[in-house]
């Protein structure tokens, strides 16, 4: 099964509530293997830190769902 790698900032509504909803559904349905981000400035660094504390990210980390460490 092919899986999708969403942009990390979608999970914290950085790109709007629609993107967040879709990203959360992807996480809930175990469709995420990798997660990426675009780090261009300090605002993105703050968003990255915020994302580490949300339920969907904690779920992926706890369940060892992400395969980023394999890269």
Image (spheres, rainbow, N blue to C red):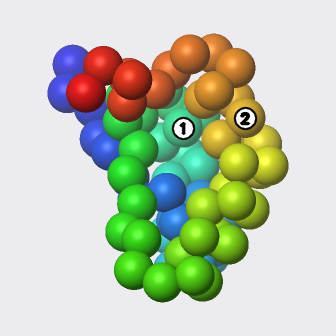
Q: Is residue 37 left or right of residue 52?
A: left
Q: Residue at x 39, y 80 (%)?
A: 40
Establish if 3 lies above or below 13.
above
Residue 26 visible in image: yes
Find disc 2 in the rendering and name its residue.
Answer: 58
Which quarter of the picture shows residue 42? Answer: bottom right
* Quarter assignment of residue 45: bottom right
| Image side of residue 42 versus residue 51, left or right | left
Residue at 60% in and 29% down: 60
Q: Position of residue 3 (x, y in %)?
A: 27, 32
Circle 1 Cα neighbour tier, 10 Å, few/some/many (<14 / 14–19 / ≥20): many
Residue drawn where x is 71% and y is 48% of the image: 52
Quadrant holding the N terminus = top left
- Horizontal arrangement in the rendering, residue 53 relative to residue 33 (left or right): right
The residue closer to the viewer here, 46 or 56, is 46
- The location of residue 44, given as percent across then percent down, is 54, 76
Q: Secondary structure at mark 1?
A: helix
């Amino acid at each position: 099964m092919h899986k999708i790698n969403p942009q990390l900032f979608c999970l914290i509504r950085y790109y709007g509530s629609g993107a967040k909803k879709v990203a959360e559904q992807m996480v809930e349905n175990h469709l995420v293997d990798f997660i990426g981000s675009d780090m261009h400035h300090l605002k993105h660094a703050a968003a990255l830190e915020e994302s580490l504390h949300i339920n969907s990210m904690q779920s992926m980390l706890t369940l060892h769902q992400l395969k980023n460490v394999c890269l």
